[in-house]
Every structure is written in structure tokens, then in C-alpha cells.
Amino acid sequence: MSLQNSSNHEPVVRPQPQAQLGGAIFDENGKEVLITEEMVQAACQECEKYWVKPEKQD
């Protein structure tokens, strides 16, 4: 089951996917890279690939 296909999903529209979110990471060369909405969405999509729905507990 995809989290994005759940029944309580509300679409989120971001007019500027490259907009900065107020955080940063450091790349392999020590350069600061600002985190964008696009980066967060890509990370979430990558995590969703490995999502396993827990078995129902009786």
C-alpha cells in the first residue's frame, strides 16, 4: 500500500519546488547545500520504496 494512495491523502501543491526550506546539508567536499522541497520529496519517495505495512495484530 502506498502512503500516497491512502484515503486521507490531501494533495499538496508547491508552486516553487526549488524553494529553500531553511535547512542545509554538507556535500562530500564540505560545501553547504540548501535543502529544497524537491530534495525532501525525492527522499520521501525513496523511503516509500521500502515501506512495509505491519501485519495486523489480533
Image (tube, grey):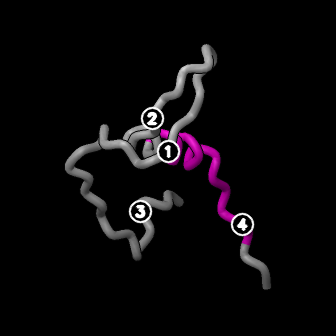
Task: Kindly report which numbered mark, 1 or 3, lies closer to the viewer in this rendering.
Answer: 1
Of residues 12 and 52, which is closer to you in this image? 12
- The residue sitting at the bottom extreme is 58
Q: Earlier in the sequence, mark 1 or mark 4?
A: 1
Q: Which residue is mark 1?
A: 23
Q: Earlier in the sequence, mark 2 or mark 3?
A: 3
- The residue sitting at the left extreme is 15
In 3D space, how far apart are the residues under numbered discs 1 and 4 (Cα atoms)?
Answer: 32 Å
- Do the numbered discs 4 and 2 sit on residues whose CB atoms are within 8 Å? no
- The residue sitting at the right extreme is 58
Of residues 10 and 21, which is closer to you in this image? 21
Q: Residues within 10 Å of mark 4 (few under 14, many from 20)?
A: few
Q: Which residue is mark 3?
A: 5
Rendered view: 1 above or below 40: below
Q: Which residues are magenta?
A: 42-55
- The residue sitting at the top extreme is 29
Q: Earlier in the sequence, mark 4 or mark 3?
A: 3
Q: Position of residue 24 (x, y in %)?
A: 52, 38
Task: Kindly report which numbered mark, 2 or 3, lies closer to the viewer in this rendering.
Answer: 2
- Do the numbered discs 4 and 3 sit on residues whose CB atoms are within 8 Å? no
Task: Kindly report which numbered mark, 4 or 2, lies closer to the viewer in this rendering.
Answer: 2
Which residue is rendered at x = 48% and y = 29% of the image? 33
Of residues 11 and 49, which is closer to you in this image? 11
**SS for dot 4:** loop
Q: In what quadrant of the picture does the C terminus appear?
A: bottom right
Disc sitting over residue 54 in the figure:
4
Q: Quadrant of residue 28?
A: top right
Disc sitting over residue 34 in the figure:
2
In 3D space, how far apart are the residues under numbered discs 1 and 3 (Cα atoms)?
Answer: 28 Å
Q: Residues within 10 Å of mark 2 (few under 14, many from 20)?
A: some
Which residue type does callout 2 highlight? Leu
